[in-house]
Image: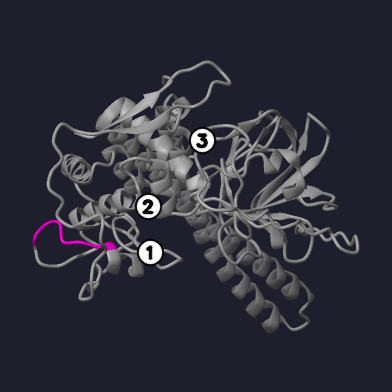
Amino acid sequence: MIAIAALGGVGGAAGAPPPVFVVVPPAQVMAPLASAEVPNGPGVAIPAGPVDPHHSAGLPFPVLQGIWQRAGTTYAVPWQVLAAINKVESNFGRNMGPSSAGAIGWMQFMPSTWLRWGMDANGDGVADPWSADDAIFAAARYLAASGGRTDISRAIFSYNHAQWYVDEVLSLARLYGVGGTGVAFSLDRLQVRLSGAEQAVTKRNHVVVRAALLERRLAQRSRALYARSGRAQLLSDRLELQKQAFQMDARRTGAAQLVSAAKRKLKAAEQALAEARTSSQTSTFTPGAGTLLAAPSYRGDYVFPVGGGPSIVSVGHHHHDYPAADIAAPSGTPLYALTDAVIVRAWHMPSGNCGIGLTLRSTVDGREWTYCHMSYEEASIQAGVAVSAGAPVGLVGATGDATGPHLHLQIDPATSYPQVEPWFQSFAGVAFRWQDAPTPMPQAGPVFEIVGPQPPPAPVAAPGDGTVIGFTLNRS
């Protein structure tokens, strides 16, 4: 079996260099099914994918373990790296794309790369990226072709040209190397439970919001009808308006019952989320597991406000019309207090352009920060409540004026970009990736070779003419 050796130990003292992965070859390497030295010739085609590749059931863990280990042994690359790539790329085959870039299948190959390096590992006569055997063996072949037998970090960089990706894959591989497949699968179960609970809360809160807004509209219409009936001069008009108001009251009562039922289901979902968080809390402190479980990332007095790491969290240097950061992440991704603070305002129902959100005042430097577009806000987040850095405050969403799920983060007043803050930039490559420039090496953590020159990050634009534009809240 292929193994990963960590030179210098796993649990070194603070400031010590991180472990360096080297490939420990097996006593006997299996004969490759397809050469890692020469890519495919003409004739390879890509078959049609499953009906819903974004929601696949995956495979039983023992089956996956066998494929990783056979592929790793065949091409003399660490099976732990194959497992980590499989997790990062498709969540063990549960989401096989196509991605926004067009990558497909179990290991998220670009179609052009698959035509060169895809293979038929299960012997059914088809090189199929939607097949776990074919895709995982092809990934091992590609890594070997990229030098993975002697320099695994360089090979991973060839798989995805981003240093944050190399670091994330090797961090997971190190975790799998120490704990074996038992750790890989136990963490996966924790993540599935946690993510499912977050999605359930997002869904239930959406139902509560819709029902509450309906009840509010019906109540407003009822009051308007009663007001009109009081001003009506003709008895017939007054009676007709009162009849309509009574019917509107009946509809409002029905809507109120829907709100109560929706809130009960939300309460149950919140309890399930609390239990999932408790179950995963210990594991979030394990190196490599924090990003997987979307735990908060800390730097001094600050926490990056969106969990999940650079594989799912990204941000641009600019904002479309005034200084702010739109931090993109999937709906339901956890949000955290970015520093020790006191909640100044919190609104749990969509309000104006901001949607669901909050404003907190840092107890470190007194500045105020506003979060917008949340899908859900923790019930404990209320005006006057003190929160610690890293405390959960809600979940990513797209409420208010938003075209997709993200956290809108701004300093109040919005006179400068959050992206220029040193604490914000220190999380690049650790908690998020830049959308519009190469993501630099993180300031701390694993250090691996970067292949090829890296252009400097794009300069951050100044706020322009100094005009301050802020989100508006409905105060009604």
Figure label count: 3
Location of residue 137 in the rendering, given as x and y in whole percent from the top left corner: 22, 52
Disc 1 packing (10 Å; few <14; some 14–19; many ≥20): many
Three-letter residue code for mark 3: Ala
Q: Is residue 432 magenta?
A: no
SS label for mark 3: loop
In this picture, residue 461 sits left or right of residue 270: right
Report the Cα–Cα distance between label 3 and label 1. 27 Å
Q: Which mark is residue 89?
A: 2
SS label for mark 2: helix
Location of residue 76 in the rendering, given as x and y in whole percent from the top left corner: 24, 41
Give the magenta range. 117-123
Three-letter residue code for mark 2: Glu
User: Going from the N terminus, do you reach mark 2 or mark 1 first?
Assistant: 2
To which residue does mark 1 refer?
103
Location of residue 177 in the rendering, given as x and y in whole percent from the top left corner: 32, 30
Report the Cα–Cα distance between label 2 and label 1. 9 Å
User: Going from the N terminus, do you reach mark 3 or mark 2 first?
Assistant: 2
Do callouts 2 and 1 mark residues in contact (Cβ within 8 Å)?
Answer: yes
User: Going from the N terminus, do you reach mark 3 or mark 1 first?
Assistant: 1
To which residue does mark 3 refer?
295
Pick the residue in front: 469 or 225.
469
- Quarter of the figure that contains the C terminus: bottom right
Q: Quadrant of residue 72?
A: top left
Q: Is residue 119 magenta?
A: yes
Pick the residue in front: 435 or 455.
455
